[in-house]
Amino acid sequence: MRIEVFHSVPQQALEIRQKVFVEEQGFQDEFDDIDSTAIHFVLFDDSDIPIATCRVFKDVIKNSYILGRLAVLKEYRGKSMGSFIVEKAEEYVKQLGGEHIKLHAQCRITDFYNKSGYTAFGEVEDIESCPHIWMRKNL
């Protein structure tokens, strides 16, 4: 396993997000302007196949780094790939001087983030008919 860090959105990340969020989950507004300024992480398996991705960006209004667009290809889920890439993204943010990180999680997967030390706050919001909630973790 290896992770590559990109300062512009790589094709591998776009393809993983297309499969997971658009084709599997039906989101239509998956790609946005943040992609052009975010730091992107791609996890490759031992055969050099891209299997997971996420992105991180600094939100000056929220005074925090935001982790988002975490996606793991279906056949690799349940094998701690999501936890691994989140941990590497957190380490990167810590190296940048970040003291905490926030994310806007689909409510159905908050247990995944709870296990990684995130706690929910605020109100549940509807994003494309999918309930989301903000979560935070001190680094």
Image: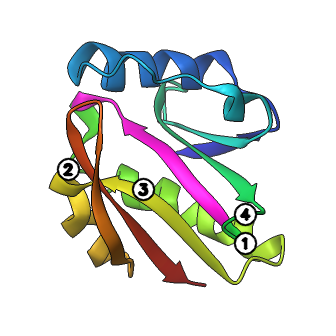
Tell me the crowding category of disc 3: few under 14, some 14 to 19, or many 20 or more residues within 10 angstroms, Cα based. Answer: many
At label 2, the amino acid type is: Gly
Distance from the alpha carbon under mark 4 to that under mark 3: 15 Å
Residue annotated with mark 2: 78
Question: Considering depth in this image, is 109 or 78 the residue closer to the camera?
Answer: 109
Label 3: state its secondary structure: strand
Residue 121 image point, x, y percent: 36, 77
At label 4, the amino acid type is: Ile
Tell me the crowding category of disc 4: few under 14, some 14 to 19, or many 20 or more residues within 10 angstroms, Cα based. Answer: few
Residue annotated with mark 4: 61
At label 1, the amino acid type is: Asn
Residue annotated with mark 3: 104
Which stretch appears magenta? 65-74
Residue annotated with mark 1: 63
Label 2: state its secondary structure: loop
Tell me the crowding category of disc 2: few under 14, some 14 to 19, or many 20 or more residues within 10 angstroms, Cα based. Answer: few
From the viewer's perspective, tell me whether residue 23 is left or right of residue 54.
left
Contact between labelled residues 1 and 4, with CB atoms less than 8 Å apart? yes
